[in-house]
């Protein structure tokens, strides 16, 4: 009942049921789940300070009940909860340390290609990028993207966030990048971007009313098109950006004019580059 009330947003009742359950349960795994649930209630109530002790107790309990400190995916899940709570409190270094531990334990317990590992890698990459640890963040985000586009349950919003993080790595901040560097790194994104498009198209019937939300698909195509451009794959960049424009033009409940204008600016640049290349080849 506690989890039901928590999911319904009735946090006072959820907290009451969790506290009653905690007094009755002795099994470490079940008690750890109750503690994590209590922590989630406190976070949703806007009290990360109140949530953290419950989450830390859950982590300690899972460690105590395991033969080793990395012997269970439950320990990794608790690290994830503690890490994200600490991030919300502004302690980025401690948060990142917990997420690193979660990634390591997930790889050991559920495998490197598990959705749990993919999610943890995505969060770790985002945290590293937020701390301007760009060199370390880039391969982590790329690995998360590769796992996300390959797993059974395809989540476009997650894919877009990862693509956008990769774009931010090369287009924001003070660092200046050589064209050769951009192409070398961004060419590694080509395969997962193509896989993402294949996943989208496989659920997009001819009438255009596909399984996925149009706005998310539009920004996936736009961001991927811009990354194809950075990779020097100009023909493919044009195709993705043109598809982005088509999707954006169909959206009626949001003003997409600036996004469409951005696509047209990129397409104008690409037209010039392709024309120049054709002239040079002639």
Image (cartoon, rainbow, N blue to C red):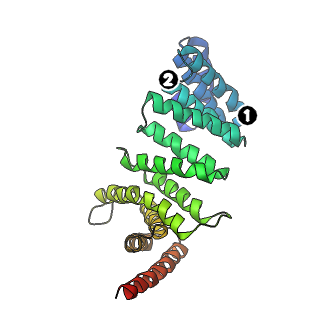
The spot of residue 66 in percent (x, y) is 53, 16
Q: What is the CA distance from the residue labelled 2 to the residue labelled 1?
A: 26 Å
215 lies left or right of 173: left
Query: In the rendered image, is residue 242 in sight?
Result: yes
Query: Which class describes the residues within 10 Å of circle 2: few (<14), some (14-19), or many (20+)?
Result: some
Q: Residue 24 sits in which quadrant? A: top right
Q: Residue 35 sits in which quadrant? A: top right
Of the numbered discs 2 and 1, the one sitting upstream in the chain is 1
90 lies left or right of 240: right
The answer to whether residue 157 is above or below residue 62 is below
Residue underneath mark 2: 72
Quarter placement of the C terminus? bottom left
Residue underneath mark 1: 49
Query: In the rendered image, is residue 1 in sight?
Result: no
Which of pointers 2 and 1 indicates the residue nearer the eye?
Answer: 2
Q: Residue at x 56, y 44 (%)?
A: 123
Query: Which class describes the residues within 10 Å of circle 1: few (<14), some (14-19), or many (20+)?
Result: some
């Amino acid at each position: 009942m506690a989890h039901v009330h928590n999911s319904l947003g009735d946090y006072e009742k959820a907290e009451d049921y969790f506290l009653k359950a905690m007094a009755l349960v002795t099994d470490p795994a079940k008690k750890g789940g109750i503690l994590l649930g209590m922590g989630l209630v406190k976070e949703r109530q806007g009290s990360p300070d109140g949530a953290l002790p419950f989450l830390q107790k859950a982590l300690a309990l899972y460690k105590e009940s395991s033969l080793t400190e990395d012997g269970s995916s439950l320990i990794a899940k608790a690290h994830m909860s503690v890490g994200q709570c600490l991030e919300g409190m502004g302690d980025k270094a401690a948060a990142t340390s917990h997420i690193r531990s979660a990634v390591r334990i997930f790889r050991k317990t559920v495998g490197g290609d598990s959705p749990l590992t993919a999610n943890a890698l995505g969060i770790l990459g985002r945290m590293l990028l937020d701390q301007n640890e760009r060199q370390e963040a880039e391969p982590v985000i790329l690995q998360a993207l590769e796992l996300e586009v390959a797993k059974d349950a395809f989540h476009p919003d997650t894919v877009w966030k990862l693509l956008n993080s990769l774009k931010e790595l090369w287009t924001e901040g003070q660092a200046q990048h050589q064209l050769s560097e951009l192409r070398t790194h961004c060419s590694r994104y080509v395969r997962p971007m193509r896989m993402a498009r294949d996943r989208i198209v496989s659920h997009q019937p001819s009438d255009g009313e596909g399984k996925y939300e149009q706005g998310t698909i539009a920004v996936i195509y736009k961001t991927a098109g811009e990354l194809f451009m950075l990779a020097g794959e100009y023909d493919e960049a044009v195709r993705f950006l043109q598809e982005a424009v088509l999707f954006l033009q169909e959206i009626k409940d949001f003003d997409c004019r600036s996004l469409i204008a951005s696509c047209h600016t990129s397409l104008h640049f690409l037209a010039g580059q392709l024309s120049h290349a054709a002239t040079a080849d002639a």
